[in-house]
Amino acid sequence: MSIMDIVYFVQQNAVAFGQIVTSLIGIASLIVKMTPTLKDDTYLKQIVKFIGKFIALNHSVDSTKQKVANKKGIAF
């Protein structure tokens, strides 16, 4: 199996990988909300922030402009 085969496989199944990741986060969120402690909440929050950097890449908007727009209720 060459590198090009792996790249082709990932390209063809990118949507499925995204669905798997979001499903796992959803299931983990349900489990975390059922537990009485907040320790697991902080771990899940860190994981979601890390994954969110890769799923919602928005390089066209500067982060300071985004913060101002969020305060004003404007969506990009």
Image (cartoon, rainbow, N blue to C red):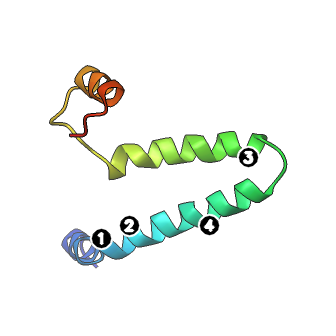
Residue at left offset 20%, top offset 75%:
8
Q: Which residue is mark 1?
A: 14
Residue at left offset 84%, top offset 49%:
36
Q: Which mark is residue 40?
A: 3
Q: Crowdedness of circle 4 by 10 Å Cα count: few (<14), some, many (20+)? A: few
Q: Which residue is mark 2?
A: 18
Q: Amino acid at mark 2?
A: Gly
Q: Crowdedness of circle 3 by 10 Å Cα count: few (<14), some, many (20+)? A: some
Q: Which mark is residue 27?
A: 4
Calculate the distance from the C-alpha at mark 2 to the C-alpha at mark 1.
6 Å
Q: Secondary structure at mark 4?
A: helix
Q: Is residue 15 above or below residue 29?
A: below
Q: Amino acid at mark 4?
A: Ile
Q: Amino acid at mark 3?
A: Asp
Q: Amino acid at mark 1?
A: Ala
Instruction: Say whether disc 2 or disc 3 marks the residue closer to the N-terminus.
Output: 2
Tell me the quarter of the picture where residue 69 sits: top left
Front position among marks 2 and 4:
4
- Residue 11 appears at what percent x and percent y? 22, 71
In screen coordinates, is 76 left or right of 73? Answer: left
Q: Is residue 58 above or below residue 1?
A: above
Q: Which mark is residue 58?
A: none
Instruction: Say whether disc 2 or disc 4 marks the residue closer to the N-terminus.
Output: 2
Q: Mark 2 touching mark 1, by CB under 8 A?
A: yes
Q: Secondary structure at mark 3?
A: helix
Instruction: Say whether disc 3 or disc 4 marks the residue closer to the N-terminus.
Output: 4
Q: Mark 1 touching mark 3, by CB under 8 A?
A: no
In screen coordinates, is 28 left or right of 14? Answer: right
Calculate the distance from the C-alpha at mark 1 to the C-alpha at mark 3.
29 Å
Q: Is residue 46 above or below residue 64?
A: below
